[in-house]
Image (tube, rainbow, N blue to C red):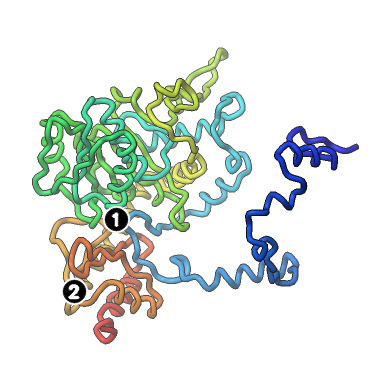
């Protein structure tokens, strides 16, 4: 029996009828506008490989890459290398989670819905906020969505962002806001001045260059101007640093990558999104609620669905369409496995590594810290030579250096330290930096 596809011509007669319908005699006529020399290019393909040979070939190609799993890395600025417990990969590999998408049918999606609910609960506890959704694309898009949410709540049209916020985050906010015609103003961190047109002020803690600010003082400025306080928090710092809810944030977001998500060419990651209870109906994305069925059993369902796919488009709060549920599950399993005490101990490891490194680097001739402000696990350093050349020198020592931030401070290098960096690793970095004078 021959299976007939309703949309594909299956016989010569069908194909001839199709060609006649579109006005050509043969299929080759469809390519008449392509120069003859380029219609059938000769492709020099290698001989076919067996599966074993193919695996070996790809392994050899992969071995040519320098990556954080093979050599030392001190690169951060939004994506950090942290230890991922083996249980995270084990749970994520289970087929019932790996194949899950949007749990439209709760009766067959209880496992996915429950893990999403747990993710929301942990997000609220971490950030000190009232409600959370099931996640956004990443930290930057979560921040942009928070700004648009503030515009919707206040009815004001301008967005204010401190100059200490990650520049990539600012660009994402601009991109989101441009489609709605909302101007984005970058204000100085030292003395931000808000007007009656500003819907919100965005602050980042720790800042892009790693410093910690007095977030309570900012709260007074923001609410005094009748705006909303939007905070982008460093996820791992929440193991030690005061959460946004404690200093009056109205909307708080974070990048969830440090919690069980390995570095992987920039993604996929997940944006953690939380807000105050009274703003829940303006919150973008999906929210999972816990309820009981007719027999009194606990059940989980999607609730307050504010996406354009679920309700009339003109009433949607956001057009986010992709579920980051598998990444949210990684975050959930990670936090559940290490617990509050484990997170604090890991955060303290980051803090100790960064402060030991700051002391070692500041003692090197030609190097000095860019700021004397408190910091968590990232430091900006003024270097004696351009960071591009310095990073090239470090790579010869088997070290991935930091991010070049020379556009913000002369010869500026931003270095990140985590609980995975041992004293010997930092000493090795310091020795390589000290030897860079000869590379100049």
According to the picture, the residue beneath numbered tag 1 turns out to be 348
Relative side of 212 to 39, left or right: left
Query: x%, y% of residue 274?
Result: 33, 34
Query: x%, y% of residue 16?
Result: 81, 41
Q: Is residue 265 above or below residue 249?
A: below
Identify the image quadrant of residue 142.
Answer: top left
Going by the picture, which residue comes out furthest to the top? 294
Query: x%, y% of residue 340?
Result: 36, 44
Going by the picture, which residue comes out furthest to the bottom? 438
At 20% across and 61% down in the image, what residue appears? Answer: 408
At 75% across and 67% down in the image, what residue appears? Answer: 50
Relative side of 93 to 429, left or right: right
Query: x%, y% of residue 147?
Result: 28, 36
Number of marks drawn? 2
Front residue (pair 316, 275) = 316
Relative side of 401 to 287, left or right: left
At 43% across and 28% down in the image, what residue appears? Answer: 287
SS assignment at label 2: loop
According to the picture, the residue beneath numbered tag 2 turns out to be 367
Front residue (pair 368, 347) = 368
| Residue 208 numbered tag | none
Q: Is residue 151 above or below residue 331?
A: above
Q: Are marks 1 and 2 in contact (CB under 8 Å)?
A: no
Mark 1 to mark 2 CA distance (whole Å): 25 Å
């Amino acid at each position: 029996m021959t299976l007939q596809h309703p949309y594909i011509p299956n016989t010569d007669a069908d194909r001839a009828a199709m060609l006649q319908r579109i006005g050509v005699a043969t299929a080759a006529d469809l390519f008449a506008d392509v120069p003859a020399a380029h219609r059938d290019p000769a492709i020099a393909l290698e001989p076919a490989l067996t599966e074993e040979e193919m695996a070996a070939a790809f392994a050899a190609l992969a071995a040519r890459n320098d990556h954080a799993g093979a050599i030392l890395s001190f690169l951060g600025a939004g994506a950090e290398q942290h230890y991922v417990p083996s249980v995270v990969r084990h749970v994520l590999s289970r087929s019932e989670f790996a194949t899950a998408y949007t749990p439209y049918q709760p009766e067959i999606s209880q496992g996915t819905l429950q893990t999403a609910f747990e993710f929301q609960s942990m997000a609220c506890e971490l950030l000190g906020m009232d409600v959370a959704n099931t996640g956004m694309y990443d930290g930057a898009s979560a921040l942009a969505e928070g700004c648009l949410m503030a515009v919707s709540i206040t009815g004001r049209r301008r967005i204010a962002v401190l100059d200490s916020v990650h520049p990539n985050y600012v660009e994402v906010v601009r991109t989101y806001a441009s489609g709605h015609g909302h101007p984005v103003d970058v204000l100085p961190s030292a003395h931000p001045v808000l007007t009656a047109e500003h819907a919100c002020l965005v602050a980042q803690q720790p800042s892009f260059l790693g410093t910690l600010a007095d977030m309570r003082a900012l709260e007074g400025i923001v609410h005094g101007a009748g705006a909303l306080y939007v905070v982008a928090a460093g996820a791992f710092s929440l193991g030690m640093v005061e959460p946004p809810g404690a200093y009056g944030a109205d909307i708080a977001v974070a990048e969830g990558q440090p919690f069980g998500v390995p570095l992987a060419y920039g993604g996929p990651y997940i944006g953690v999104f939380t807000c105050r209870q009274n703003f829940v109906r303006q919150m973008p994305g999906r929210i999972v609620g816990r309820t009981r069925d007719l027999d009194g059993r606990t059940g989980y369902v999607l609730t307050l669905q504010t996406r354009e796919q679920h309700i009339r488009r003109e009433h949607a709060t956001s057009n986010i369409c992709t579920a980051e549920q598998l990444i949210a599950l990684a975050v959930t399993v990670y936090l559940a496995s290490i617990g509050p005490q484990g997170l604090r101990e890991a955060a303290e490891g980051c803090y100790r590594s960064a402060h030991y490194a700051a002391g070692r680097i500041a003692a090197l001739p030609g190097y000095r810290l860019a700021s004397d402000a408190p910091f968590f696990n990232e430091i900006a350093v003024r270097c004696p030579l351009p960071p591009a050349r310095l990073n090239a020198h470090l790579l010869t020592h088997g070290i991935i250096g930091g991010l070049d931030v020379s556009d913000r401070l002369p010869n500026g290098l931003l270095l990140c330290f985590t609980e995975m960096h041992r004293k010997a690793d930092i000493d090795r970095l310091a020795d390589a930096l000290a030897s860079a004078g000869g590379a100049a």
